[in-house]
Amino acid sequence: MTTMHKRFLLASRPTGEATVDNFQLVEAPLDERLHEGQVLVRHHYLSLDPYMRGRMSDAKSYAPPQPLGEVMIGGTAGEVIASRDPRFAAGDFVVGMGGWQTHQKAGPNDRTLRKVDASRVPLSAYLGAVGMPGVTAWYGLTQIIAPKPGATVVVSAASGAVGSVVGQLAKARGVRAVGIAGGREKCDYVRDELGFDACVDYKEHRDVQSLSRAIAEACPDGVDGLFENVGGMVMDAVMLRTNPFARVAVCGMIAGYEGQPIPMAFPALVLTNRLRLEGFIVSEHPEHWPAALKELGELVATGKLKYRETIAKGLERAPEAFLGMLKGKNFGKQLVDLR
Amino acid sequence: MTTMHKRFLLASRPTGEATVDNFQLVEAPLDERLHEGQVLVRHHYLSLDPYMRGRMSDAKSYAPPQPLGEVMIGGTAGEVIASRDPRFAAGDFVVGMGGWQTHQKAGPNDRTLRKVDASRVPLSAYLGAVGMPGVTAWYGLTQIIAPKPGATVVVSAASGAVGSVVGQLAKARGVRAVGIAGGREKCDYVRDELGFDACVDYKEHRDVQSLSRAIAEACPDGVDGLFENVGGMVMDAVMLRTNPFARVAVCGMIAGYEGQPIPMAFPALVLTNRLRLEGFIVSEHPEHWPAALKELGELVATGKLKYRETIAKGLERAPEAFLGMLKGKNFGKQLVDLR
């Protein structure tokens, strides 16, 4: 039986909200021939992440846009099925930036492909808690917020792949961890399963003052650090509760429905509370990845770092799962099972 | 002849814009008797600074509000006329936080009072370029923006007491200095007399896009650092031109007419350009003052650091001069001559 190679291309750029029509599925028999130095990987999992939405636009950003007509960018975890690169052998488990496709041929210059140990840590975790989202959490918390024991750190999108790790790493450092999430179910999970000290359901609040009061209740000693995954009203509400010299790691910022900017309501707080805000992209700090991955891998292997996954079955479901994730329909790390 | 002691008290808090009616002049014969440890100072100059407007309100801020019915807070420079403190003698020139009054009796616990050398540096400069405004410029530029030679730093309110020093210190460090100021006269001064590379007149621009284009022309290599004294549209326009990893020292932020917050229009730039924004209050960093004052004093004494003063004559003029300064009517450091 011929193995089929399925791929999703970016067919068009969104005008306003992204839709399934922006993606095009292409199918062809898998070409298994390899040149010297190439590695053929069968993908088990595709990671779906918010940054992909940014790449779909051609607005100026920190990364060049995803080219039209090419395979959508994306992190992948899989198994080597053939190799002409001495560093890899059939049967090796690997992670890389293989994109929205069932297989990839990685070239000798692909520096993203690396072997992982899938015996102590589940393969899919290398796309979440022990991958880019986990390192993002680690970097923002330890290198930007750098909280002292006893401090209070708030994290938005707290049940997500990044936010859930931020809070658990904070707790492990003796820090009060307060989450913000959408809905009772997510908040219960953040507090009861992940062990955050408190979680505020932003959907219960219609305006920034109401949300800010709820944050004040959850943070009786004020806010010393904010790990911001969202921006907008959620960020405004937390900023109102910051203590002097609080630090804000800016990891994600939503835009409005039509892509227009959402303002920050109270920027004067940067001065009055002597805040430090810092935006970061974790891939720009490769020197920190080994230490981060070591800590995260050990915590997952020993069951001390919990995470949840929402797994869509089959590449065909990727666009729908991606669009749902942008609206918060996933619970924990959003993956696609490509097997 | 009896010497009169004149003082301005804060009579009421502003509702909306501050007015002369918020201040009350009180006059009484000067009581020259001193307790052990006290110093009697005759003020030559009172410094008028934007921070005073914040203290007039009782909104939560980094400093407690100015109490009603007490002498308005303010930096002063003067001469000791009598002393029962062995550290000071009649004839010494001193600076301190003497407030809006012709004389002060400083107690033994007044740590703000210090002797200055008025032979190489004019006494009034200790309230400006060699005082709090100068150190503010020094701290924000060297400790927060920390530009490399060849970088571009933009400073708003560039003809003011702080901004003028920021640009000159930047130039001395091999940095391209670009000012933003209101009106042709101030811009000519910033460029032609202070030696900035360029100055943008914000009054020539009605919207953020137009102002931002002018900033792009003045900053052909983009903006690596912003010393922000204003906030609002000026800050938005500069943020649009920031390079990756640019730093923003937040020193001043205006509020709207009725004291309502003015939003930041494009906060997502913090993420896309990986900006670092930091608010600061120079009095909280006393460890840096000696090095800053040494450099600033030497530059002024040798004529390498230029500054301009607007001097109102007589304490009675202080409220009017203060309100004018809040509207940008002064040119350079606003002082009141109290002699």
Image (cartoon, coloured by chain):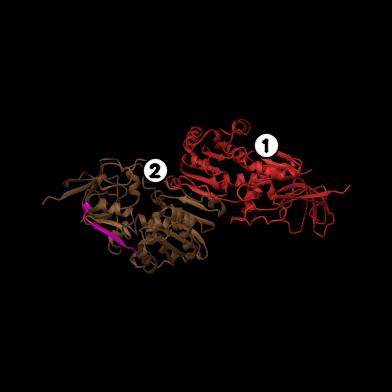
Chain colours: A red, B brown
Residue furthest to the right: A1
| Residue B211, label in figure | none
Q: Which residues are drawn in magenta?
A: B305-316
Residue furthest to the bottom: B192
Is B306 in the magenta?
yes
Is residue B42 at all visible to an observer of this figure? no
Is disc 1 surrounded by few (<14), some (14 to 19) or many (20+) residues within 10 Å? Answer: some
The residue marked by circle 1 belongs to what chain? A
Q: Which image quarter holds the C terminus of chain B?
A: bottom left
Q: Are both tags, 1 and 2, on one chain?
A: no
Look at label 2 and name its amino acid: Ser
Camera-nearest residue between A149 and A333? A333
Q: What residue did someone put label 2 on?
A: B61
| Residue A308, label in figure | 1
> Hey, which quadrant is residue A127 in on the image?
top right
The residue marked by circle 2 belongs to what chain? B
**Could you tell me how far apart the alpha carbons at marks 1 and 2 are, in whole angstroms?**
41 Å
Look at label 1 and name its amino acid: Arg
